Image: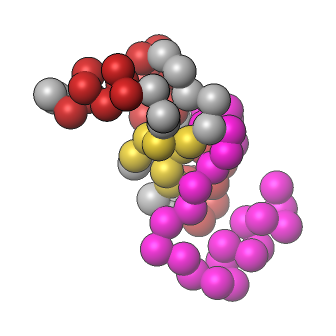
Amino acid sequence: MERSINIISKTNPDYVEVLPGVIPKVIRTVVEQTGKPVFAGGLIDTAEEVEAALAAGASAITTSNYKLWDLYDKK
């Protein structure tokens, strides 16, 4: 994790994608230590997993579950 944070700091990306996105602890750490927007993706299949990622600080979610697209597109 420390190596990843250092790379993010050195390269200054516009955003960081965290995979798999079902690990809120990692999402929270990346957001807190880098200040970068985080896209959470990978293995996200339920609305509860989306909510957990967002609550941990994710700015966006990537998922191939189109039912979640429709659910969150309406909000």
> What span is in magenta?
1-26
With respect to residue 56, does 9 lie above or below?
Answer: below
Compared across the picture, whether 33 is left or right of 68 comes to right
Please say whether residue 55 is visible from this viewpoint: no
Residue at the location (46% across, 74% down)? Answer: 14
Compared across the picture, whether 55 is left or right of 42 comes to left
**The C terminus lies in which quarter of the figure?**
top left
Residue at the location (69% across, 84% down)? Answer: 10
Residue 68, by quadrant, is: top left
Position of residue 70 measured from the top left corner of the image (x, y, whole percent) = 25, 26
Given residues 62 and 66, the one toward you in this image is 66
Q: Is residue 24 magenta?
A: yes
Residue 74, by quadrant, is: top left
Residue at the location (85% across, 67% down)? Answer: 3
Compared across the picture, whether 34 is left or right of 53 comes to right
Position of residue 31 measured from the top left corner of the image (x, y, whole percent) = 55, 54
Position of residue 1 measured from the top left corner of the image (x, y, whole percent) = 82, 55
Position of residue 61 measured from the top left corner of the image (x, y, whole percent) = 44, 41
Residue at the location (49% across, 50% down)? Answer: 39
With respect to residue 68, does 12 lie above or below?
Answer: below
Q: Is residue 19 magenta?
A: yes
Compared across the picture, whether 27 is left or right of 15 comes to right
Residue 67, by quadrant, is: top left
Given residues 13 and 43, the one toward you in this image is 43
With respect to residue 41, does 50 lie above or below?
Answer: above
